[in-house]
Amino acid sequence: MGSLPAERRFKVDSVCIIGAGPSGLAAAKYLLAERAFSRIQIYEQRSTVGGIWNYVPHQSASPHDVDIPQTKPYGGVNKPVWQQSGAAKVFGKDTKEEAVYTTPLYDRLETNIPRGLMGFSDLDWPEDCQLFPRHEAVLEYIERYADDIRHLIQFRTQVMDVSLSKDEKWMVKTQDVSHRGGEVETEMFDAVIVANGHFDIPYMPQVRGIEEWSKAYPGSITHSKFYRTPEQYASKKVIVVGNSASGIDIGHQIEQSCKSPLLLSSKSESFLVNAASSTKVDKPPVAEYMVENRSVRFEDGTTEADVDAVLYCTGYFYSFPFLDMLDPPVITTGEKVENLYQHIFYQPHPTLAFPVLNQKIIPFPMAEAQGSVIARVFSGRLALPYAEEMKAWENDWAEQNGDGRMFHVLKFPADADYINMLYDWCTSADGEGSERGKVPPYWGEKEYWMRERFPAIKKAFQDLGEDRHVVQTLQEVGFDYERSKRSDNE
């Protein structure tokens, strides 16, 4: 990651956190531990914590909310779906509505990270939780993590705009979304942490004929954000595009119910273990959609006719519409977040911070590691370089690791090394070792060992079929760190 020259210090009094998902909650805990801030305010547009881990049923997730193709990161402030509230349904009334915000969470999602590596450093998983937890268990885990900071959260409050005042304070405009047409307010903060995630605006590439196909066969092309159950694709001829975590998992689910074989289109080898199957055929990228006979041509020249559905598992743009007025901008192409230092701090005004933008990482430990540094910078116990040096870091990083979509990717062991760099950085703060501050996780040999092997661990878990639901330890799927360590030393 390079050296971290320390020259510029901040003394923040009030902090706004956007989002009560894992990243926002972790940031709040590390801020509280500094004992340096008079106000920590979390704004959450939903009525619950958890962010992306809130499940939204299929009927609330409309695939018509996305353009086809979707090649730009601009979709405006996230618009809710207004639906009858739970209380209204119970009492048979239809006057009470609540705002629902679509997430990419699907019905049978299980984590692709074993719980021993995935969790927060100060909260254990329940002993009876399966090795790769279901999404319901993850949400319950996050809810327990939030118990001691709920008093900081203002629910049903959507951030509409964040801009810098003349005296360099952040003006945060919010709207009450507990009902339609809610009140709009503006409050001032010394610092803002943008922790609302980056899984909102789907990326769907431009392919010859895709618009004509989509118009001819409405709903036949969509994105994994709107996938919920494999039954949506029962007995259909399906192409799944993309082979990262969602593409592999969703493809495996659809494969069990669609017309055989499933066609899995990708441009490179997956970092996950993708087992061969007689009911799945790997294909290169799609080159053209042809309306006649519902045909698709691939880059190798082969064609498939009578295709019923195409599901893009191709990721998302970075998009922060409430920051559109920033100059210089943080979003241009949407492939990366611009003008950041160490993937976190907005260089022109580092009191604006962005945790957990990175990809191919373990998010919860990353949220803690970055939250620990943000808290110490905002309290004045850590310093940052001046803007010129921060820009030089950004340029060097892009040159060494790739710009655009590769900029925030930390493939193992880069992710583990980064977590430990952040640990070293935060524990170099002034006054470290006193009662101030919360210490983030540090990865040792066991965490590196588990991180390197988790794709294989996941495959072994998945191969157990329904029996996997009672598996709770690595040893039960044939992975034993202590035994492996002894074997290496023999």
Image: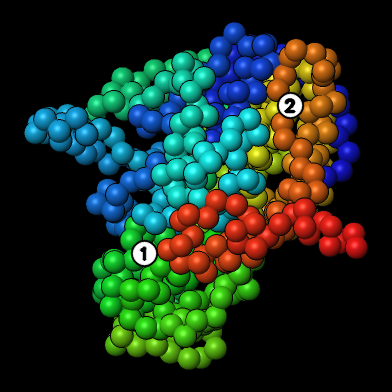
Q: Quadrant of residue 102?
A: top left
Q: Which of the image's four quarters has the C terminus?
A: bottom right
Crowd tier of the residue under label 1, counting other residues whose Cα lies within 10 Å: few below 14, some 14–19, many 20 or above: many
Amino acid bearing label 2: Val
The local secondary structure at tag 1 comes to: strand
Measuring 58% from the left and 18% from the top, which residue is drawn there? 15
Residue at image point 63% right, 45% down? 116
Quadrant position of residue 394: top right
Q: Earlier in the sequence, mark 2 or mark 1?
A: 1
- Of residues 144 and 437, the one nearer the viewer is 144
Residue in the image at 41% along x and 50% along y:
105
Residue lying farthest top? 38
> Residue tagged by mark 1?
222
Read off the residue under disc 2: 439
Which amino acid does the dot numbered 1 rest on? Answer: Thr
Residue 177: where, in percent of width, then height? 31, 27
